[in-house]
Image (cartoon, rainbow, N blue to C red):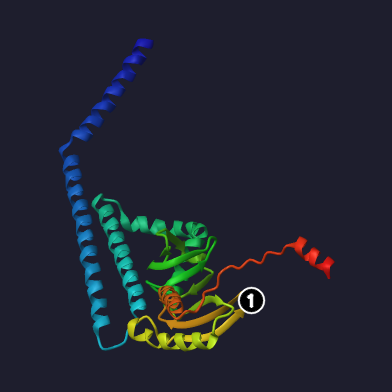
Amino acid sequence: MAIHVVEKETKEIINISEKIWEYFSSEDLWNFIVGASIKIIAIFLLSYLIVFIGKRIIARIFKLRMQSPLKYSERRQQTLLKLSQSVLSYVVYFSAIIGALSSLNINVAGLLAGAGIAGLAIGFGAQNLVKDVITGFFIIFEDQFGVGDYVRINTSSAAEGTVTEIGLRTTKIVGTTGEVYIVPNGQITEVVNFSLNNSKAVIDMQVGIEADIEKIENVMTEYLKTLPKQYEELVDVPKFVGVQNVTGTEITIRIVAETKPQQHYGIARIIRRDVKKILEKNGIPMAYPKMMIYDSSKAMSRGDEN
């Protein structure tokens, strides 16, 4: 009886193995696999070419817009350019995935209908994604900041740097030392944009307490008048504000220069360098630490003599 059972099970295993072998060795299956593979490769290759060419066409269109007589904001055009290219990639590759599934004889319509029903359940867990997309839309619509702007964004961890890309879901920022912040738009609660208005360079220099302030003012005024012709970053002639502070051994003088957005750092360095040279050339002493030594024993002896 046991031998009969073993023989029966063995025959069933052999029959199943033969069916599996026949299925995988059938000409129809391999014709389907080869045909579907060729279709899928062709679909994704065509999608890549469409995205590659489409991005360059979009970039060309925006470049022509910038060259037109109409005044377009360069930062806003760069933002819309990046967004348009991202949307093109999403649409084309999503369509490619649908086409690939159709090549595998998968009922895409039924799959999408099922996804629509499942989306109701998934939506409760995708609230952050929806929030990111909505916030990203309003950032772009209200032009809060654009590609190329230098911003500080208050999120769970503050990010500061130059905006390189704005999408509907995330914003990419490159920091001053090269680090890249990828910030979900839904986490952006407050934005400080340093690129919308002109910047101001405030330069404080310390000179000796015995320096001639009138001479300093005359020399600095003549020097500052020459700067706008040399540096296009300056919006107007820098101003010599005057004495900002006086301490026991030094006087602080202040110069204020209005520059184009984010150009004040370089201008401030140039002015500090030149001011130091001009002061030295005109014999105006710079401030330096002074020390007074008090000898208590001599003071006591003088007191006894008195």
Image quadrant assignment for residue 156 = bottom right
Near-viewer residue (51 or 18) = 51
Q: Position of residue 245 (x, y in %)?
A: 61, 79
Residue 31, placed above or below residue 136: above
Q: Is residue 261 visible?
A: yes
Q: Residue at x 38, y 59 (%)?
A: 113
Would residue 166 be seen by someone viewing this image from the given angle?
no
Please state the horizontal and vertical placement of residue 233, each as a whole percent of the image: 37, 80
Q: Is residue 64 left or right of residue 139?
A: left
Q: Secondary structure at mark 1?
A: loop
| Quadrant location, the N terminus | top left
Q: Position of residue 288 (x, y in %)?
A: 55, 69
At 53% from the left and 81% from the top, the residue drawn is: 254
Count all numbered tags in the image, as a single digit. Answer: 1
Which residue bears the numbered disc 1? Answer: 247
Is residue 246 placed above or below 39 in the rendered structure? below
Of 233 and 54, nearer the camera is 233
Which part of the image, by quadrant, shows the C terminus? bottom right
Nearest the eye: 173 or 58: 173
The location of residue 134, given as percent across then percent down, is 46, 70
Callout 1, which amino acid? Answer: Thr
Q: Is residue 3 above or below residue 198?
A: above
